[in-house]
Image: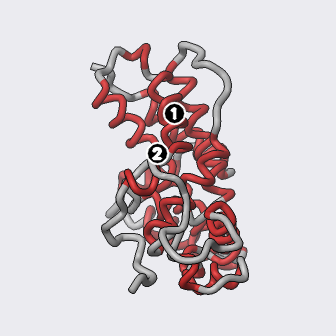
Amino acid sequence: MPHDRGSGAVGVDPEQLWLRPAEPRRGRRPSFSREAIVEAAVTLADSEGLEAVTMRRVAAEVRAGVMSLYSYAPDKETLLELMVDHISGELMVTEAPSGDWRADLKTIAHLQRAHMLRHPWLPAALFTRRVPGPNTLAFLEHALAVLRPTGLDGAAKLEVFAQLTAFVAGHVAHEVAQTAVSRSPDRAAAEARYLAAVAADGCHPELAEALAAPGRPLTPEATFTRFLGRLIDGLDTR
């Protein structure tokens, strides 16, 4: 019997999922579409987190029986694949690459960050999914076109895109976690005093030097931009 499985389970058939019509496999045709199921699941994940997305909850959102959902998504893993590709449609790029591949890659990364902040569950989902759908492939196609001036071979270009996406996902996951943690002014002051004491103990000269350096803007956008610059400006295209 179909059931909810964790997103790390195996079994999604890419041909069945992406190359065949989205129709129920058997029985009476449901009164809802696969798109409606996916949209309901995305809304749940956006508001309550990925853990809230169960076949039972999604069925309730579309006012259907759980078993009727399995005609379109046989398990949660398949549903997750559909969710990720559905929201990837937000990343459609209409402008052609400028020819400045580093600048274009930075633009891609900023698009990805904004996208993941809109859907905070996405970074975790990206670490487990393996089957890019049509919307994901369209964005990948643009990224590969951006990388054409580098002269890298196809495998290397795919690696660069994977590296960039992993960086953005990891950064956003940390950013979201930090935002969720309540840091009172008293707690922040205590942390500053602690680090000052450690830096002054004579046992951590490198840390003391680092802490004594001029500060940099600490807004999330500025921090991301600095980190991204270090990554992309240092990419080896040999």
Is there any visible trace of residue 227 in the rendered image?
yes
Q: Can you give x and y, in whole percent of width and height, for residue 224 in the image?
A: 58, 45
The reply, left or right, for residue 41 in relation to residue 22 is right
Give neighbour class at mark 1: few <14, some 14-19, many 20+ (Cα, 10 Å): some
191 up-or-down from 55: above or below: above
69 up-or-down from 166: above or below: below
Quadrant the C terminus occupies: top left
Q: Can you give x and y, in whole percent of width and height, for residue 110 in the image?
A: 62, 40
Q: Which element is circle 1 on?
A: helix
Q: Can you give x and y, in whole percent of width and height, for residue 187 in the image?
A: 64, 78
What residue sits right under mark 2 in the picture? 165
The reply, left or right, for residue 234 in relation to residue 48 is left
Number of numbered labels in the structure image: 2
Q: Which mark is residue 28?
A: none
Front of the two marks 2 and 1: 2
Residue nearest the observer in this picture, 96 or 110: 96
Residue occupying the point 45% across, 75% down = 75
Give neighbour class at mark 2: few <14, some 14-19, many 20+ (Cα, 10 Å): some
Residue occupying the point 57% across, 35% down = 108
Q: Amino acid at mark 2?
A: Thr
Q: Can you give x and y, in whole percent of width and height, for residue 64 in the image?
A: 67, 82
Residue occupying the point 54% across, 16% down = 100
What residue sits right under mark 1 in the picture? 229
Q: Amino acid at mark 1?
A: Gly
Identify the mark nearer the N-term, 2 or 1: 2
Q: Which element is circle 2 on?
A: helix
CB under 8 Å between discs 2 and 1: no
Quadrant the N terminus occupies: bottom left
177 up-or-down from 27: above or below: above
Residue nearest the observer in this picture, 20 or 172: 20
